[in-house]
Amino acid sequence: MSLFGEVPQATPVAVFKLSNDFKEDPNPMKVNLGVGAYRTDEGQPWVLPVVKKVEKIIVADNSLNHEYLPILGLPEFRSSASKIALGEDSPAIQENRVGAVQCLGGTGALKMGAEFLRRWYNGNDNMKTPVYVSAPTWENHNSVFANAGFEDVRPYKYWDAEKRGLDLAGFLGDLETAPKHSIFVLHACAHNPTGTDPTHVEWMQVAEVMKRRKLFVFFDSAYQGFASGCLDKDAWAVRYFVTQGFEMFCAQSFSKNFGLYNERVGNLTIVARDADNVRRVLSQMEKIVRVNWSNPPSQGARLVAITLNTAELFAEWKDNVKTMADRVLLMRASLQAKLQVLGTPGTWDHITQQIGMFSFTGLNPKQVEYMIKERSIYLMASGRINMCGLTTKNIDYVAESIHETVVNVQ
Amino acid sequence: MALLKSSKIISTVGVHPPLGVLSIRASSWWSEVQMGPPDPILGVSEAYKRDTNSKKINLGVGAYRDDQGKPYVLSCVRKAEAQIAAKKLDKEYLAIGGLGDFTKACAKLALGDDNEVIKSGRNITVQTISGTGSLRIGANFLSRFHTEARDVYLPKPSWGNHTPIFKDAGMQLKAYTYYDPKTCGFDFQGALNDISKIPEKSVIMLHACAHNPTGVDPRPEQWKEIADLVKKRNLLVFFDMAYQGFASGDIDRDAWAVRYFIEQGHNIVLSQSFAKNMGLYGERVGGFTVVCKDAEEANRVESQLKILIRPIYSNPPMNGARIAATILNTPDLYKEWLGEVHGMANRIITMRELLVANLKKEGSTRNWKHVIDQIGMFCFTGLKPEQVERLTKEFSVYMTKDGRISMAGVTSGNVGYLAQGIHAVTK
């Protein structure tokens, strides 16, 4: 008899299963448009040149060691990371009302924010406070908040499948009818999985309702710099909300824009009313960190901190980021052009209108299955493709495959 | 305070449609958030840092220091780092369960190379965020799947962070007698008495070696009796092994209890940390192992561990695991590592002896034998909180209130001063 005899087999996390299936596929033409990681035009992972440079600096520096970081993380990392999100000249930073917690990637930052909110937001038991995530959203959002103890995680209207764009009326409608004090998870830019972001005017409308109805702003910023190629442009929404006087959280990931996926570099930026509130919030964050991981890993944070705090390295990094963003933009333009040339039924403008790593193609589950089974092109059941998986060498095959799929499968 | 301010403003301004700007600026979501108390252990280091006394000693956190009081980066670690740098690896996400080369080696280190458990594939070992992360995943796993019992029995005393971790995971904490303050040693009979009363299927936490905070470990014959009793009581054993190699200087000796229990048929869960024995503190390298009935069960358990990990941090950090794996899997680095761990353990044993010798020199008539009998990084001095407070205030010696000192912070340079201080507050 085993204590674990009743433990059921869990269904594997979809995106990782997809990568696994891709790996085992013998078809030489296979293409992986699943996992969200950048690839070069040769289809290879890319360690940023600036990262290689800084790694050498770290290895050569004998004054560095592997001692514990403080509970909240490396101070130089935290402050420079928050500056990246809020802007060097952010009024909130100047007014000393910004705090930060170094976390295990963007996931870790969301986790810390969620745990804190469940304990301390709006009274001290928020299990029943509704948490709204976009429909659709990164699938792990649901789990992060549910596991942090929130019993009521719900969707807010976001993607309009028919017009293949933002359902603004639906979004604003859900904001109007959400119970007061509900928590809303907003994608700062390059919405995952749709690649569809609100325009500035649309963000302003969202902000107006959220302010009026006292809804909590929790930004997820996983692609800053990666979306447009410009850090400031991609942070517009976050910064706008700060100017509107919100107290808010912003979960930042440096996985994609630094290519540091496996070093788990993230930051939870906290904007509060004043320094005293920040201080108390951080003291409670420490308690939460302590029962989850005690203190965060040092390597990645060190790397990012050195880069952000050294002028030439910072410039080089921005350049590397632009390289990645530009290649994605090029692939978007190419794919859309090829589909037009092929005369593929439907409209494909959304491919170039959408932004960031992902595109919601609009392919339905049957069509997705066809792409995988018949063409060995791996994409998520939602129709999401990772633009980074496209290269000049495989883009014709992918375009033709989409064409064939759309024509033959309804 | 902010709340008071805001209600004042609201009462004078009244409720206007654009309540917006004025009252939002005044009130805060966080007004009711209390200032959290400083962490008892990590808070000690922070207080130490603020002290300007040149003679100050940090005997708080369990981080190894060399005889100059400096952090020690192991030579095998530097070599491993150089090897890794030369390989020019990518930075792609690890699997949720971590780096395979690391988890396999991690299990082998704990259980022994040709342990039947590993051979039959009936263990699942996942990479975790050091020891804390491992305990947390374990606590979450037990909370979700060990529904027959909610109680976790910790030795009295135990590492301060055990309680909040298990509590936060939804378990209930109880304790069994362990430390005998009269002898500053192991209360074997007391432990057996308490364990014999633990309800079946409860979880019992055992420190594999170098008990934290007391440094008091059971002897092998005592472990055997405990294993027997635990089996009779049908308890789920949770081993915390944060100091393998660090206690006696010998990897196998320090893992003896873990291996014995498994041999005796206990399907244990095990947390491992490489913070101390590889000096990889800030890289957060650890492992969590569940010993299952068979490989099929291990598969199911693995799938559930992944479900638990994903919503916390998705997948673990590469750097430290890569270093540890390189050391464990490269014969000459492994050999060098064993030597360095032995060296660290030896320095600590030497400091124990020096401290007692110096206390005697100061004229202390107290029995300090326990300082030498205890093992590992920590020493439960037997000092009371008031004495600890004096030691900190008057001598700038930083330690935790329970009288625990980290021997790693003792050097041939400061042991004399330390003995002075301890004697002064205990005479």
Image (tube, helix red, strand yellow):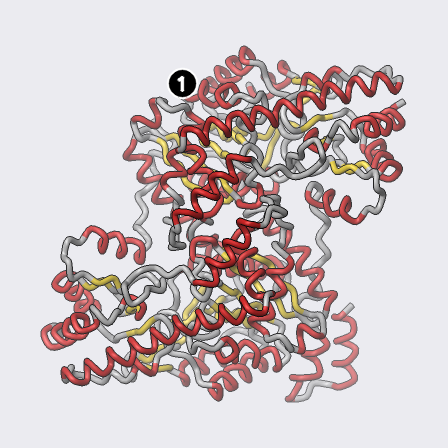
Residue A297 in view (yes/no): no
**Residue sitting at x 28%, y 63%:** A43
**Residue sitting at x 78%, y 68%:** B1
Q: Position of residue A264 (x, y in %)?
A: 48, 55
Q: Position of residue A288 (x, y in %)?
A: 60, 51
Whether A383 is drawn above or below B290: the answer is below
Q: Nearer the viewer, residue A212 or B414?
A: B414
**Residue sitting at x 69%, y 64%:** A278
Q: Residues within 10 Å of mark 1 (few under 14, many from 20)?
A: few
**Residue sitting at x 80%, y 15%:** B367
Q: Which residue is the site of mark 1?
A: B263
Q: Position of residue B126 (x, y in %)?
A: 41, 40
Q: Nearer the viewer, residue B145 or B187?
A: B187
Kind of residue at badge 1: Glu
Which residue is situated farthest in the top direction here?
A: B221
Q: Nearer the viewer, residue B300 or B274?
A: B274
At mark 1, the secondary structure is helix
Q: Is residue A362 left or right of residue B92?
A: left
Whether B84 is drawn above or below B123: the answer is below
Q: Quadrant of residue B31?
A: bottom right
Specify the quadrant that holds the C terminus of chain B.
Answer: top right
Q: Quadrant of residue B220?
A: top right
Q: Position of residue A61 (x, y in %)?
A: 59, 50
